[in-house]
Image (cartoon, rainbow, N blue to C red):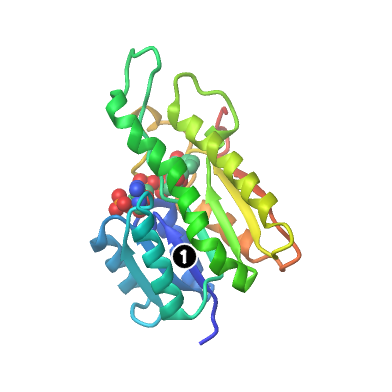
Amino acid sequence: MTEPVFLITGASRGIGAAVARRAAAAGYRLVLVGRTAAPLDALADELGGGDRVLARAADVTDWTALTGVVAEAEEHFGRLDVVLANAGASVVTSFLGEHGAPPEQWRDLVLTNVYGPALTARATLPALRRTAGHLLLTGSAAGRGVRPGNLYAATKWAVTGLAQAIRAECVGTGIRVTLLQPGLVDTESIPPSRADDPKLRPDDVAAAVLYAVGQPPHVDVNEIIVRPTGQRN
Ligand SMILES: NC(=O)c1ccc[n+]([C@@H]2O[C@H](COP(=O)([O-])OP(=O)(O)OC[C@H]3O[C@@H](n4cnc5c(N)ncnc54)[C@H](OP(=O)(O)O)[C@@H]3O)[C@@H](O)[C@H]2O)c1
């Protein structure tokens, strides 16, 4: 079978699951990664199971687990064409300490949002080089502007830098690199304080992802910023 293979981290719900559904509809075979097996298995069943979808529980901050999944995916499908480094976490923070999560919770946020996509890139780029493939990273509109006291936004600034560093290193390989910067999206990760703000649907972001990967090989969509109409920053 030669249909292209699309690996998604953070695939079990939200933006990742919406991309999985659109990618399956576009004919991709899928590798779905997240920490919790049950929702990944359910999505894999929904999208064809067996020959078409490999669902594996792995933490993107665990190098051994991540490289194991990538090796298994190449073994199972024979190739890897597109990777979306999408797994991420969000907590409310304050550097003045006036509200938000205690600093003990900040470590996991930074590891998941910065170390995770860095490891995902390192684990998958050798395979993408073999197919002249496409790496996408889910940053955020929060990775472009100033958000007072917001460590999450700082991690997304790091993803902005990561995408640029990876693209610069990949010049000459045929690999395309896209930084995805969504505004507020209606998923489980948004804080209650944003409940009444305008929001995108996860499928709106998935449509943007499929636009980028659907371009011909000589077109590298480097950045996609998509906000709900009326979002302030
Ligand atoms: N929602 C928004 O407004 C918004 C806006 C801009 C950017 N983003 C970014 O979009 C991405 C997806 O967010 P979302 O809103 O779709 O969130 P979500 O609905 O909470 O989904 C997060 C996904 O990531 C997985 N995950 C979390 N930590 C992981 C880890 N350490 N290793 C592997 N998988 C992990 C989760 O599954 P498990 O818990 O089972 O691991 C889940 O599949 C994130 O990078 C987020 O920062 C979101």
Residue 181 vs 197, above or below: the answer is: below
Give the image quarter of residue 177.
bottom right
Q: Give the residue drawn at x 72%, y 68%.
A: 216
Asked whether, in this view, residue 157 is left or right of residue 114, the answer is: right
Q: Give the residue drawn at x 60%, y 48%.
A: 179
Residue 169 vs 140, above or below: the answer is: below
Q: Looking at the picture, how far across and down is residue 188, in whole percent?
A: 33, 43
Which one is in front, 117 or 32?
117
Q: Looking at the picture, how far across and down is residue 89, in whole percent?
A: 37, 41
Binning the other alpha carbons within 10 Å of mark 1 as few (below 14), some (14 to 19) or many (20 upward) gives many
Which one is in front, 51 or 67?
67
Task: Identify the secondary structure beneath mark 1.
Answer: strand
Please name the amino acid that badge 1 sits on. Leu
Query: Which residue is label 1 attached to?
Result: 7
The C terminus - image quarter: top right
Asked whether, in this view, residue 193 is left or right of residue 177, the answer is: left
Q: Looking at the picture, how far across and down is residue 25, in whole percent?
A: 49, 72
Q: Looking at the picture, how far across and down is residue 122, in whole percent?
A: 51, 56
Q: Give the residue drawn at x 71%, y 68%.
A: 217
